[in-house]
Amino acid sequence: MTSMDSRPAPGAVDVVARPTLDDVARLAEVSRKTVSRVMSGGQNVAPDTRERVLRAAKALRFRPNAVARDLRTGGTSRTVAFVIGDLTNPFYAAVASGVERALARQDLTMVLAATEDQVEREVQAVTAMLERRVRALLLVPISDDHSYLDGERELGTPIVAVDRPLSHAVSDLVVLDNRGGAALALRALVDAGHRRIAFVGSSSRLRPHAERRAGYEDVLRAAGLPVDEALIRQDAPDVDAAEAATGQLLALPDPPTAVFTANNRATAGAARALRGHPSRVVLFGFDDFELAQATGVSVVAYDPAQMGEAAAALALERLGRPSRTTEQITLPTHLLVRGDISPA
C-alpha cells in the first residue's frame, strides 16, 4: 500500500475566499454601509473610522469591485473595450498597443476580447462588454449586420470601427489606404519588369481584401496587362490555405513571376510554398511583420499602433462631443522594398 504525503509542496499558498465588504466591516467593527462609503471616496466619515476601515481592507487584501461600484452609484466606467479578430495575429497586437497607450494617457484601461473572426463570437463578446458598461467600444467588425448596435449608439456609447466599417450601421472609422497601398506594390512590380503577377487574398467578403484586390487590378489595367483570373486566389484565410493557394499558382503551365499577398497570413503561407521552389518568384506582401523582416520580403507598410491610437482618439472625442458627425480617418501606407524585386 502506498502512503500519500499530504504535506504542502514548497512554495504552496493557502487559497482563501476573496474578502467582501462584510469581511472588512466585521474586522473594522463598522457597518457595511460605512465600508462602502469609505471605498467609494465618500466624505461623511470620521477620520479615525476611515483609517480603521482602510487598515482592515489592507489587512484582508480587499480590492473594491470597480464595475459593481460604477453600476451601483451611476459612476462613469474607466474601461474601454476593444474587440478584435485573432489574438495570434501580430497586426491586432500592434493595434491594441496603440489603443492602450492612448487610453493610458487619459487614465483609462483597455479590456480585450477576440472573436476568432466568427460572427457569433463577435455578438457574444460585444454584448458582454456592453453589459459591463464600458466607456466606449472599439471593434474590428466581422458580422454582416451591426444594426444590433444602434440602440447602444443612441444611448451615447462611442463606437469606433477599426480596419473596416460596420455593416448596416454608422460609426466613426479608422482604416488604411488599402487600395492605394496595393497599387504602390503592383506598380513597383510592373516597373521592375513583371507581367504575370498573382494575387493571394484572405476573405473576399471583407472590405480590406476587396480594396487591395482593386488596387492590384487598377495597376494591371493601367499598364495594359490582363487581369487573369487564373492568377487570383481568394478566400485563403490562414497560413495553410495561403500556402496551398500559392502552390496551385506555382503549378500552373505558365506560372507567375511574382506573388502579391494581401495580408501577413497570406505572406507567411506564400513564403512556405516558395521555400525550395526551383524558379525565382518574387514575393511582395501587404503588412510588415517579423517574418517579412527576417526573410527580406518586400511589403506595403504602415504603423498599426497609429491605427489604435487614432481609434482611441476618435472614441475619446466622441465622449466630449457626442452629437458631432461621424468621422473616418484613413492612414497612409508606404513601401519597404527589401532587395531585388526584378524577375529572374
Image (spheres, helix red, strand yellow):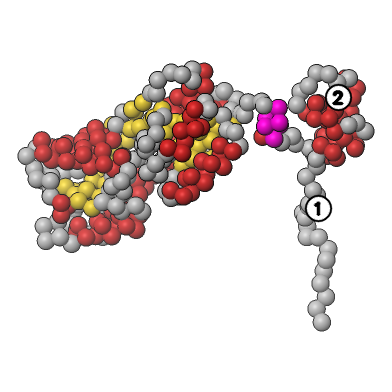
Identify the residue under disc 2. 50
Say if residue 86 shows up in the picture. Answer: no
User: Which residue occupies 81% across, 60% down?
Assistant: 8
Q: Residues within 10 Å of mark 1 (few under 14, many from 20)?
A: few
Is label 2 or label 1 in front? 2
In the figure, is residue 97 to the left or right of 213?
right
Please say if the residues under marks 2 and 1 sit with CB atoms less than 8 Å apart.
no
Disc assigned to residue 253: none
Q: Quadrant of residue 221?
A: top left
Q: Position of residue 312 (x, y in %)?
A: 48, 28
At mark 1, the secondary structure is loop
The residue pinned by badge 1 equals 14
Secondary structure type for disc 2: helix
Identify the image quadrant of residue 108.
Answer: top right
Picture layout, residue 314 above or below residue 212: above
Residue at 45% over, 24% down: 314
Observer-nearest residue: 19 or 296? 19
Residue range (magenta): 68-73
Residue 72 lies in the magenta-colored region: yes
Which residue is more in the foreground, 196 or 131? 131
